[in-house]
Image (cartoon, helix red, strand yellow):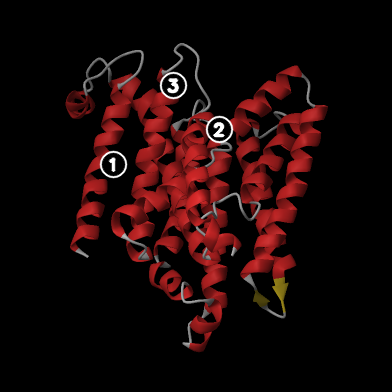
Amino acid sequence: MQKRTKLLLILTILLPASICVAAGIGAYRILPWKIPRILLFKEEAFPILLYVRFPRVLLAALVGSMLAISGTTLQGIFRNPLADPGLIGITAGAGLGASIWIVLVGGGKIGIWGLPIAAFVCGMFVTLAVWKVSEIQGKVHTVTLLLAGIALNSLAGAGIGLMTFLADDEQLRSLTFWLLGGFGGATWTVLLVTLPIGMIGLFLLLRQGLALNTLNLGESEAYHLAVPTESIKRVSVFGVALTVGAAVSAAGGIGFVGLVVPHLLRLMGGADHRFVLPGSALGGAILLIFADLFSRTIVVPAELPVGIVTALLGGPFFLWLLIRFKRQIFL
């Protein structure tokens, strides 16, 4: 317990330090320890920090936190170390909503709001469809939930493929960059719209630590111990839908954060979800802050999509997990 408390304390200290470091690095260099003074006295670099750097860095922290805690929750529900936020179709559903908006609708009266709204609504719709398909006499079995998610993931992927086929060159470029994920369009407006939804989802999921520990015993065992398993799954999936839907609508398709971070936390402090959930929220924020920093500085003046960076990190990690846990999965 002392080790876990220390790890959470270290992550809590590292998060604001990471925000200051990332906010200071760019075309205009700002020393991190000078940032508080610049903000306090509104010195020369104040507009750069306020209107360019901080909205982007804070949005990256929020999205990373939401994706990581969602992955942790799904791994707890499915009792599968390879589960991630894309497993039950939310990511693909949000991507389908965004691609339909880009290719078939475009601007319209709600302008820049249209794409994130379309992505969020479609992601939530796919989640609801997965839940309804997997529901049997008022109960949802995790295996059925997983299979329904795979099926609707495939359908949403087919829809994205169709939109890609129908897109012209300009639409195809926009669609490709959005699906790969990034924070190039981060503003205070996007952050303030994403924040309430994300905070509700984070609040719901952070409260599930003890419940997910109980589910590790198995659904039948937990049920016989008078644990409300259906309620736990309902609240958890709803929280995941909120966080992933908000994250994808704000930043596009960024993968592997929900897979990598929870396992790093488990390796450092054990599998207790009362530790892994808050730790993943903090660790995911830190990871995505530095992934975004790398993406916007490695190929200056261009910008590498953040989804490519996380895939380069997460792909090898996923293979390592598969090799390590394949006996538990396939035997």
Residue 300 higher or lower than 286, as above or below? above
Question: Outermost residue, top direction?
Answer: 301
Inter-mark Cα distance, 1 to 2: 22 Å
Q: Residues within 10 Å of mark 2 (few under 14, many from 20)?
A: many
Q: Is residue 261 visible?
A: yes
Task: Check disc 2 and report the residue beneath it.
Answer: 181
- Sequence-wise, the earlier of marks 3 and 1 is 1
Query: Could you say which is closer to the camera, residue 296 or residue 147?
Result: 147
Q: Amino acid at mark 1?
A: Leu
Query: Could you say which is closer to the camera, residue 113 or residue 214?
Result: 214
Q: Residues within 10 Å of mark 1 (few under 14, many from 20)?
A: some
Where is the N terminus found, in terms of image quarters? bottom left
Task: Check disc 3 and report the residue beneath it.
Answer: 296
Q: Describe residue 86's horizontal placement relative to residue 157 as left or right.
A: left
Q: Are marks 3 and 1 in contact (CB under 8 Å)?
A: no
Q: Describe residue 121's horizontal placement relative to residue 259 as left or right.
A: right
Name the image quarter holding residue 6: bottom left
Q: Amino acid at mark 3?
A: Arg
Where residue 9 appears, as percent x and y from the top left, is 21, 52
Where residue 331 appears, as percent x and y from the top left, is 59, 65
Task: Check disc 1 and report the residue beneath it.
Answer: 15
Q: Are marks 1 and 2 in contact (CB under 8 Å)?
A: no
Residue 193 higher or lower than 239, as above or below? above
Q: Residue at x 25, y 14 (%)?
A: 44
Q: Amino acid at mark 2?
A: Gly
Q: Residues within 10 Å of mark 3 (few under 14, many from 20)?
A: many
- Sequence-wise, the earlier of marks 3 and 2 is 2
Q: Describe residue 273's horizontal placement relative to residue 10 as left or right.
A: right
Where residue 8 appears, as percent x and y from the top left, is 25, 53
Query: Could you say which is closer to the camera, residue 82 or residue 100?
Result: 82
